Amino acid sequence: MKTPLGLLAPCLLLFSSVVWSHADPISDLRSVSVFRDADLNRLGSGEVLAARGPAMNFNRGLAVESAYAVRLPVPRAVGLHQQFDPVRHPDLKVFLQGAIPNRPSPASFERLASAPSNGSVNAFAKATENAPADPAKVQLSAAEAKTFTGGAEVSRGGLSPAVVQFWSRILAQRAQAYASGGINAEPAFEGAGGTIRPGEEASRLLSEAGKVQQQFGPIIERSGLRGHGGGTGTYQLFDVDGDGAVSLSAFHSVPVNDGAEAADITYYSSSGFYALVSFYRFWPVTIGGQPATLVWRVDLISSPAFSELRGIERVGSGAAFMRGIQKDDKAIVSDAAGAR
């Protein structure tokens, strides 16, 4: 799903805010994460830890941390995360995934024509048809939504040619914007919270996550969070609580000391959330006498669902998101076992 670590120019990034012990990765994990009692033996046996991160003063923001180990050396572990295909795991409810080239065009998204016909995809098609009247339903600007011209012909999949053509054009334009200047170059769209600017959502999430800024300085400065395009792009068609949605993301990685850092930036989604950034720290470890990788993951998400909830309902929604992250991590661990 992204650019292999081996293709990165070798470099040593020195950031005074990032301090790793080099000698004991599990101690590093315990010191920087919420997992004070993490055990490498248990992680090496397939345990996946997940917990809420520090609370935010941002009513639609949430942080989740997770930790796990993959029995692959760091370069291959990074490559596994870059190339991870959730479509292979039906319980993740991702119906389609495709690569975004360096110079995206509408033709880059032609695989949307092979979308399955199911309830989620049909709901997505209907929301698209209503987009000119309700652009917030699919998180588009009013100008973008008005370009949908309709069409009754149905494709072999679950989306009509008119819907495929419309989204291919919209996604290409948004992918081009990211390539030109990262998430801050993304156009605004209408959402449940009014006009939303993806760059501002990501900046607010980072401002509320001081630990992330401190520990992930190298990748933050060299990714689309700081105006850089590039990365390895991916688009998806997936389920959000029974409705279909499309998204765009870019995966950036850099070598750090004897390990690596990465940021998977979902800079556009037509439903479910406004911005999602997944950070990864990869440490080299030895498990069962073989080279392996200890992974710390931090997800920062901005979602309108959180701003509408209070008390136990907000806690429950956050727990559901956390379980989704843990399920995703377990799928990655499973794929790593098959890649050995």
Image (tube, rainbow, N blue to C red):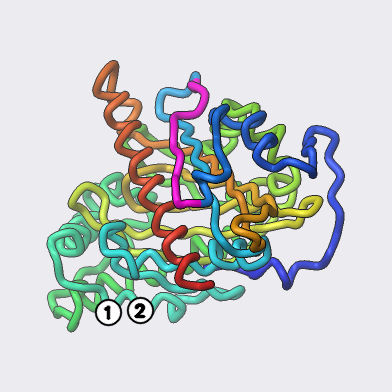
The relative height of residue 325 versus residue 211 in the rendered view (above or below) is below
Is 319 one of the magenta-colored residues?
no
Quarter location, residue 98 = bottom left
Residue at the far front: name it: 289
Amino acid identity at mark 1: Ser
Spot occupied by residue 125 in the image (x, y as percentages of width and height): 20, 63
Residue at the far top: name it: 311
Spot occupied by residue 21 in the image (x, y as percentages of width and height): 79, 38
Which of the two residues, 104 or 98, is positioned nearer the viewer here?
A: 98
Q: Is residue 277 visible?
A: no
Where disc 2 sits, the SS reads: helix
Spot occupied by residue 210 in the image (x, y as percentages of width and height): 64, 27
Q: Which residue corresponds to the image point at 32% horizontal and 74% vertical from the top-left? A: 112
Where disc 1 sits, the SS reads: helix
Q: Which residue corresponds to the image point at 79% horizontal and 35% vertical from the top-left? A: 19
Instruction: Indicate which disc residue 114 carries.
Output: 1
Q: Is residue 231 left or right of residue 24?
A: left
The relative height of residue 321 versus residue 265 in the rendered view (above or below) is above
Which of the two residues, 303 or 173, is positioned nearer the viewer here?
A: 303
Amino acid identity at mark 2: Arg
Check disc 1: other Cα within 10 Å, few if <14, some if 14-19, many if 20+: some
The overriding secondary structure of the stretch rendered in magenta is loop
Which of the two residues, 67 or 308, is positioned nearer the viewer here?
A: 67
Q: Which residue is mark 2?
A: 111
Is 52 one of the magenta-colored residues?
yes
Cβ atoms under marks 2 and 1 closer than 8 Å: yes
Magenta residues, as a range? Answer: 45-56
Q: Which residue corresponds to the image point at 58% horizontal and 59% vertical from the top-left? A: 251
